[in-house]
Structure formats: structure tokens, C-alpha cells
Amino acid sequence: MSSVLATELNSVFTCFTYIMPLFGAYIADRHMGRYKSILSFSLWYLTGLVVCTIAAHPAVMSMPLFMAGLFGGVAMGVGGIKPNVVVLGADQFDVTDPSQRKQRDDFFNWFYWSINFGSTFSYIFLTNLAVQGLPPLIPESFGFFASFLIPSISFFLAVCIFYAGRDRYVKKPPQGSALSRFFDILLCAGAKSFHGKVVLSGGLVFIPAIITTTASYFIQDPTLHLAVALAGAGMIVYGTLVLVTSGQDTSWVLLAADAGQYSLGEVKEVAQVVRLAPYFSFLIVFWAVYAQQSMNFVMQGCQMDLRVGDAQISSAMLSMFDAIVILVFVPVFNSVLYPVVESCGIKLTLLRKMGIGFVVAIACMLVAGLTESARKDAGVLPDLNSNCAQPGEHLAMSQLSVWWQSPQYLLVGIAEILVSIPCTTTSYALRLSDTDQLCVAYDLFYSEVPESMRSVCQALNLLTTTLGSLVAGGTNSIFSFWIPSDLNTGHLEYVFYVFAALVLVNLAGFVVVSQGFEYHQPAKTTLDLVSGFSPALPRANHHRRQSRQT
């Protein structure tokens, strides 16, 4: 399998894992409820893991079987788990009881730590186990098999424990899908307005864009491959431009109230979401940069000096820096950096933090490009083959250590904090207090919309992650001639510079559009909702902010 195809398949997998939660949330809200959805999709997920484990056994080594388990099992199964598990956990607490509200906050604390512990364990231990085994207990040839067997056994035990507590859970019945109501109102309003049709075309074009770009990954003919990839990219550009230039005008949405099927209040809630359309678009390019750490950064690391003692580590292991950066820097930013900056008279609004995050993302891509140039200039290690090489392939490693990638991983983590986890108070999910404000990644798509629309906003937020991954894979597809299997004969640094240019254009548009943004505080309701949609931290709706400033 070529390096470009590997990164493209990674992009497809990411798309699946962020699209399927929309389906899982709809099933839970409309039909099955959260408990049954989690249990059903967990069994599906477990089946996929088992299939992947069997396919990875040295006696089998079946790529088609592995892909079936990965995409048909794991990617599909995650759809019912990701949007529902944190919400089911929050359902167990009576938030009218102050002591239980504090217990619920502690639950979010442990939930987040558990995610990052599992992620760090996977990057540090399982990635290295996959490529070099654990001699003498696990031979190198059984490394990949063992790296899937351990998660399969662990997940089986987790499902058993989850099922064992079935009689103790608070199981709220399905109450209808806000997501389906949201789209119903948009379609109703769009039918009554040309402007609405244009905006809807910008949003709906992403569907064929996903299909077209994904299809391009599997086309062998170079000319047709490039043509289809460019067609997918063109659709994404069209959708992005439409939402950026036309999305803020929400007057057309109000026409849905004229039909009499929806109340004016329901329609205005949808309009509050639509006004954020440009910012959904701006996030797409950021997530394309974020996706580099599981795509091009890994390829780059494969041809750097991977040696630690007498062994070679996995280049994917450095992805652990993302979790570490969030764990370390979020409290530092919220407790030290943000207060110091604001004490100097600089108001750090959500949009200003996002803008700074885009600047950091540009710096990240420039550093990655310079690192790639330095890697090629450093010369190769003689008679050493990278552990990323295919059987029978020689993949030379540079004399430049893989640890020189640390700055670019650090920068992408900091950019994520600024763009995806912008908090305006000094409290933090890992340092909970009894005050009436709790910052658990209150971003634009949570704090700037009514409570009834928050799950919808986070669903759309997930779509930006999907589309960002698609842009990353599509860019690799278009510029595949710069990314050969042996990077020493290519120009991966040019790809990083392309992403830097994309973010720069993105930043320019963001600066222009954000000038007209007005912060507001949505009307408070008696609901206490928790959103299960989040690419970064779990969101919890505690008490609303007492005031917001521009």
C-alpha cells in the first residue's frame, strides 16, 4: 500500500467516525434511547475489533477482512457510542440536588481523564507493540495481532461491566430528534427563498464532496484520479465560500414560521445556529491541519531516526503529544496566560482566541515544512531500514532524530486549545469548583446558541472535523506526485506549505467576517442539557455566564 493511499484511508476512517455519531444520536433520540443505543453499537464495535484482530493474525493477514472490520465494524459502531455515552453518564445525576451536581462534575473529570489515559496508552504502548512486538513474550510477527487483541479483550470486559449495571441506570426514553427538526425547518424556509436555496446548496454540496473525494482515493488512473479529486475539492471550496459570504444573513430562515407548522420561537432557535455558518466553514481548514498528526506527520517520522537504544519506536507514538499538551497547557492557559493577558487590558474573546489559533496553525505547518527540508538535508543512516517499510522494501531513515518533530506536535496542540477549546473563565474541567461557572470547552457552537440547539451545533461541529479530514486526504490526493513512498525523492514540505497558505487565506476571511459578529446570551430555560458531541473535551451545561462582552 502506498503512503498516499494509507493517508487517504486514514482520512476516510476519520470521516466515518465523525459522521456516524450523527446517525447514532438520531437513533438514540428518536428510537432506542441512549442505553440501548450504546449497548447495541458497542456489540457492533466489538465485532469489528474481533474481525480486525483475526485479520491481523500472521496466519491470516487479510487486508480485505481487516478493512471490513475497521470500516464496517469499528467506524460504524463508534456512531452509537461517541454521542451518547457521556450523556448517559450525566443522566444518572439529579442536578437539582447540589451534591449530585458536584458528583456529575466529578464524572466529567474522570471521563475526560479516562479518554486521555486510553489515548496515551495506545500511542505509547500499542503503536510500538504493533511494529516491534514485545520479545520474548510477543514476537515481532505477532505485534499487530497483539495490538488489536488487547483492545478487543479490554472492550469486551468494558461491555460486560456496562451490561452488568443495566438495572441501576437511569434510562430516559427517546424524546425526539432536535437534529431532524432543525433540518425540517431549514428545508421549509429554503423552499420559500432564493437566498435560502443558495445557502442550503452550500451546505448540501458537502455530501457529494465527501463521496467524490473518497472515490478519488481508489482510482488508479492518474489523470482520472486528479480530475475526480479536483472535483471534490471544488465542491468543498464552493460550499465554504457560500457559507462564509451568505451564511450570516438568517432572515430567510424566519420564513419557515409563515407555514404555521413551526412556532416563531423554534424558527428563531434555528436561525441562531445558521448565523454561525461562516465559523463552521473556517474550522474546516483548521481540522485539515490537525489531521496532519495522524497522516503526513507519521509518514515524515517514518523516515527520521526512530532509534531509541537498540530498538526503533513507532513514528505514530509522537501523536501522544496532543493529549499531553491539552492536559498540561489548558490549565496553564486558563489559570495563568489568559488572566495575565487580560490584566494588560486585552480582552480575549472567543473569536480572538480562534484567530490566534489559526496563526499558530500556520506556524505549525511552516515548522513542519522546515523540518522536512532539514530531514532530507541531514543525510541517511547507512544500512538501517525504517520499521515502516513494507516487506521487501528499503526505506531509509534520516540522521535527523524523530524527536525534532516535537515542536510541530506542540504547535498543533496549542492551536487546538485556542481554536477548539476556547474558555473565557479560569475554571477548568480538570479543576472543578462549586462556583456558578464551569468552563468545559464553551465555544461558539455551545454558548452562542439556545440550549435546545446545542446538540445540533455540536453535530455540525463534528462535520467540520469530518470535512477537515477530507480536505487533508484530498490535498494529499491532488499533490500525490509530491508524496512518493520514499519521501527523499519527493517534496512533502511543499504539501505543508500548501496547508500554511490555506490557513492564511482562511485567517484573512475570518478576520473580515468576525468584525461583524455580536455576542449574545441565549434565553435561559429550565433544561439542564449535556451535549455528547465534541472533538476535544466533553461539554457540560452548568449555569450560564452572568454576562458576556464583545
Image (cartoon, rainbow, N blue to C red):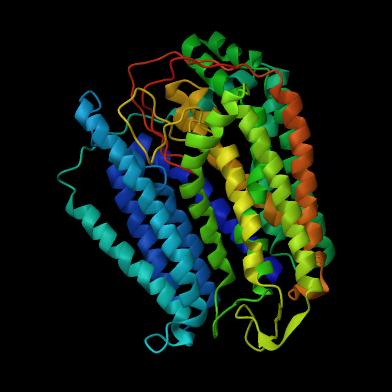
Residue 247 appears left or right of 319: right
Question: Which sits in the foreground, 358 or 12?
Answer: 358
Q: Quadrant of the N terminus?
A: bottom right
In depth, the one of 68 and 545 nearer the eye is 545
In the picture shown, does residue 157 fall above or below 236?
below
Residue 168: give x, y in percent of width and height.
Answer: 15, 44
Does residue 263 appear in the picture of this structure? no
Q: Is residue 453 above or below residue 381?
A: above
- Report x, y in % for residue 241: 76, 33
Res. 219 visible in picture: yes
Instruction: Tell me the quarter of the picture where residue 520 sits.
Output: top right
Q: Quadrant of the C terminus?
A: top right
With 393 as the anchor, is 313 left or right in this view?
left
The vertical placement of 143 against 95, above or below, is below
| Above or below for 546 versus 221 | above
Give the total number of marks visible in the rendering. 0
Q: Name the residue: 54% across, 73% down.
A: 64
Instruction: Classify residue 289 as left or right of residue 160.
Output: right
Depth check, front residue: 404 or 186 = 404
Q: Position of residue 428 (x, y in %)?
A: 42, 36
**Residue 346: image location, x then y, percent:** 63, 24
The residue shown at (53%, 46%) is 19
Most extreme residue toward the right, as rendered?
223
**What residue sits 36% from the left and 71% below the top?**
150
